Amino acid sequence: MNTETTKCLIAGSGPAGYTAAIYASRAGLKPILYEGILPGGQLTTTTEVENFPGYPNGVTGTELMEDIRNQALRFGADIRVGTITEVDFSNRPFRITIDDENTIEAETVIIATGASAKYLGLPSEDKFKGQGVSACATCDGFFYRGKDVAVVGGGDTACEEASYLAGLCNKVYLIVRRDVLRASKAMQNRVQRMANIEIIWKHQTKEVLGDENGVTGALLVGKDGVEKTITIDGFFLAIGHQPNSDPFKKYVETDEAGYIITHGKSTRTNVPGVFAAGDVQDSHYRQGITSAATGCMAALDAESFIVDNPIQ
Ligand code: NDP
């Protein structure tokens, strides 16, 4: 049986993957894109997106991703259901296994598998996702203007999100499980300077409270075992992200947290012909628009790589 081949295989279907598919299709690479376990990516887990350029009246995350997907389809991208489970990047063409079953050979690979926000794992947290529970203050903070919210976490993301929310909300509780912040000194100072941020030290969340309209509060428990309830409308998680780089790590260099390392002002990885775009290589900006932009870069990088490195 002949193995299927492609000039460009794209793994992942967030703004980075779909944008890479638009550019690669228009460049005649006939890309094949596998959507992965969450078609449309993290944006499909948020409600309204108001900061993606081109949508003056806002758009839902799902609609936005459908629009970018349809744009890729219009130029002939072959978008398929399936997840990359294993790769062999030791030689070109690269061999990629889908769902532990099918193998495909690709001249170039664009990894755009994104990152997943970590959650606490409480059933009540799951229940109110999109109804007051969010893992993205920049996406959803605006809806809590003038209200009281909580942020969980003590790292740079938690402090950044708490400061962002403090500019919009009446009050922000920062729930920290230890008696110190992991965040950089500058970030700690920023949080401590803001009068409407109250840090609740040495507390964990036991339950997110709510009713049919969404979140109404959180039940916290201190290190001493004493419980307390706070009244809030929004509950933001900022306890880190997990880049979805596992299937590629045998060949592709990552940093300690698992983010794929790209070189210079490009999407090149340490494996010539393998490129990375979006949140799987970005622990810092993590926005839909920056993700889309690196997807574009990856397709342009793949296109010029194929021209310079033809397979005989
Ligand atoms: P981090 O891993 O740095 O911090 C995670 C935080 O969440 C820690 O305070 C941790 O507590 C807490 N936490 C983890 N699990 C739980 C849990 N189950 N319950 C309660 N709290 C929990 O992640 P970040 O996303 O903050 O940062 C990731 C990287 O990105 C870092 O290198 C950071 O410096 C960088 N970054 C830089 C920014 C900037 O410079 N502007 C902005 C944002 C991120 P504990 O400390 O006890 O482990």
Image (tube, rainbow, N blue to C red):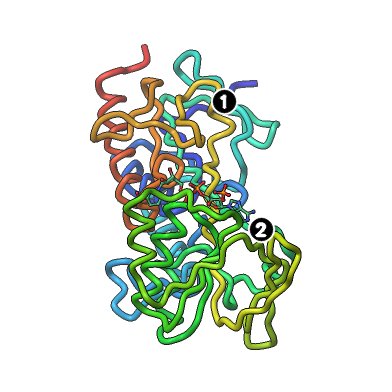
Q: Nearer the observer, disc 1 or disc 2?
A: 2
Compared with residue 32, is residue 159 higher up or lower down, i.e. above or below? Answer: below
Which label was assigned to residue 156? none
Q: Is residue 218 visible?
A: yes
Q: Which residue is mark 1?
A: 87
Mark 2: secondary structure: loop
Q: Is residue 266 left or right of residue 15?
A: left
Number of marks in the rendered image:
2
Among numbered discs 1 and 2, the one appearing first in the sequence: 1
In which image quadrant can residue 253 be found? Answer: top left
- Ligand 1 has an atom within 8 Å of the beta carbon of the residue at disc 2: yes
Q: Which corner quadrant holds the N terminus?
A: top right
Q: Nearer the viewer, residue 101 or 125?
A: 125
Q: Is residue 219 left or right of residue 185?
A: right
Residue sitting at x 52%, y 63%: 135
Q: Is residue 45 visible?
A: no
Amino acid type at mark 1: Val
Compared with residue 156, is residue 57 higher up or lower down, i.e. above or below? Answer: below
Q: Which residue is mark 2?
A: 120
Q: Is residue 96 left or right of residue 107?
A: right
Amino acid type at mark 2: Leu
User: Contact, CB < 8 Å: mark 1 with mark 2?
Assistant: no
Few, some or many residues within 10 Å of mark 2 (<14, 14–19, 20+): some
Position in image of residue 292 (x %, y %) = 35, 52
In which image quadrant can residue 247 be found? Answer: top right
Residue sitting at x 35%, y 71%: 194
Q: Nearer the viewer, residue 186 or 148?
A: 186
Compared with residue 260, is residue 193 higher up or lower down, i.e. above or below? Answer: below
Q: Is residue 53 left or right of residue 291?
A: left
Mark 1: secondary structure: strand
Residue sitting at x 42%, y 60%: 159
